[in-house]
Image (cartoon, rainbow, N blue to C red):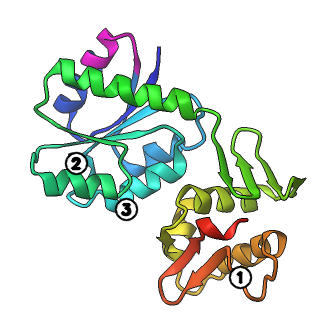
Amino acid sequence: MAKILIAESEVECFTQRKIMFEEAGHEVFQFSDMDEMSQWATSEDVCGVVLSEHFTLGDPTHLIEKVKAKFLAPIMVCTDLKDEDTHSALLESGADDVITTSATPRLWQARLNALLRQYSSDKSAVLTFGSLVVDSQARLVTLNNREVYLTSHEFELLWLLARNAGNVLSREYVYQTIIEKPYQDDTRTVDVRISRLRKKLEDDPSQPSKIKTIWKQGYIFVREAWK
């Protein structure tokens, strides 16, 4: 049995998928808004997330990023649109799979099973970038084969950055994801935490090359910098 979360604001659509997945022996839960999603943020038992375009209100990119930052499980996005551009854009935004809403139950099951196999193979939740190893389940970080002590806040920040390696994350996005409160322009909370993280991980914190600031955009975890 796998635990599946469905992000769906339309009751009828959720009910149809719930019945379909439960008949296959899975345990199904719904979240219909972001507050409900946040309650599941630390669950390690979630095996897959099905994200409906109805839930995203037309712009799924930000939500896909937020869900991927919170869950270790892969994400399937379902859309009413069948064109290649839409599906490609969703995959480029971070979705692990895209399926049309009108797909047959057999295809839904096949695609879901593929996602669950991916979750099973990635369940260790260990990210490795050269000399840096980040273990989410053990909450352990090693650099050059030496353990690096991080506070809980620092680990959450590193995990968010590492999970999105190569992508620029805005200060607002980092704040809302980590702090889970509305962003305030005058806050320096994220800057302070980034600075502390750099002091523990960078060769030269005054000239960061691994966790870089992109002017007026945000921060980026540089995948190639960890040797």
**Residue 221 counted in the magenta span:** no
Q: How many marks?
A: 3
Residue 179 is at least partly visible in this image: no
The residue carrying mark 3 is 62
Instruction: Check the image and report above or below for 49 versus 151.
Output: above
Badge 2 crowding class, 10 Å Cα cut-off, few under 14, some 14 to 19, many 20 or more, is some
Query: In the visual, does 158 lie left or right of 100?
Result: right
> Residue 78: x, y in percent?
23, 40
> Residue 83: x, y in percent?
9, 51
Residue 195 is at least partly visible in this image: yes
Q: Which comes before the other along the chain, label 2 or label 1?
A: 2
Q: Which comes before the other along the chain, label 2 or label 3?
A: 2
Badge 1 crowding class, 10 Å Cα cut-off, few under 14, some 14 to 19, many 20 or more, is some
In front: mark 2 or mark 1?
1
Q: Which amino acid does label 1 sit on?
A: Pro
Q: Which amino acid does label 3 sit on?
A: His
The residue carrying mark 1 is 208
The kind of secondary structure element at disc 1 is: loop
Query: In the visual, does 100 lie left or right of 119?
Result: left
The residue carrying mark 2 is 53
The kind of secondary structure element at disc 2 is: helix
Q: Give the range drawn in magenta.
A: 20-27
Dividing the picture into quarters, in which one does residue 180 lie? bottom right
> Residue 45: x, y in percent?
56, 28
Q: In which quarter of the image is the C terminus?
A: bottom right
